Image (cartoon, grey):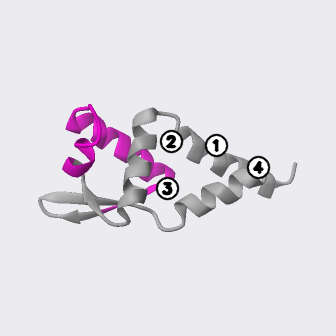
Amino acid sequence: MPASEFDTGTRLAMLCKALGNPARLVIVRFLQAQRGERSCGAIVEQLPLAQSTVSRHLRVLREAGWVEARVERPRVRYRLRSGALEEFKQLAASL
């Protein structure tokens, strides 16, 4: 297997793993529908989870490249990373 195929598979697995939790899937869907930045508090309102739990899910999504964060003291504003969904679709289509 060429290295580029392995890298593609690794990236797709990382994106899929991040979506492997229903809460993170809801967060991605919510941010996609908003088409803009939202605070953690606005995201918490969409889920039956504590703010600290949602923050941990957002960290996983950031690390995987689904979400971007911008500090706006005292809040952090989150949005779906531009191109993340397209990247996922392209990688999944290569299966």
Residue under the image location 39 percent in, 36 percent down: 23
**Span highlighted in magenta in the image:** 41-69
Q: Which residue is mark 3?
A: 65
Label placed on residue 54: none
Q: Which residue is mark 4?
A: 6
Amino acid type at image mark 1: Ala
Closer mark to the observer between disc 3 and disc 4: 3
Q: Which residue is mark 1?
A: 13
Q: Position of residue 21 (x, y in %)?
A: 47, 33
Q: State whether residue 7 appears in this view.
A: no
For the residue carrying disc 4, how many other residues have a C-alpha within 10 Å: few (<14), some (14-19), or many (20+)?
Answer: few
Separation of marks 2 and 1 at Cα, in angstroms: 9 Å
In this view, the residue in front, 7 or 95, is 95
Identified at 51% across, 42% down, the residue is 18
Q: Nearer the viewer, mark 4 or mark 1?
A: 1
Q: Residue 77 at what x, y percent from top left?
A: 26, 60
> Which secondary structure is most common in the magenta stretch?
helix
Going by the image, does 93 lie left or right of 47?
A: right
Q: Check disc 2 and report the residue beneath it.
A: 18
- Against 20, is 71 above or below? below
Distance from the alpha carbon under mark 4 to that under mark 1? 10 Å
Ranked by sequence position, the earlier of labels 2 and 3 is 2
| Residue type at tag 3 | Gly
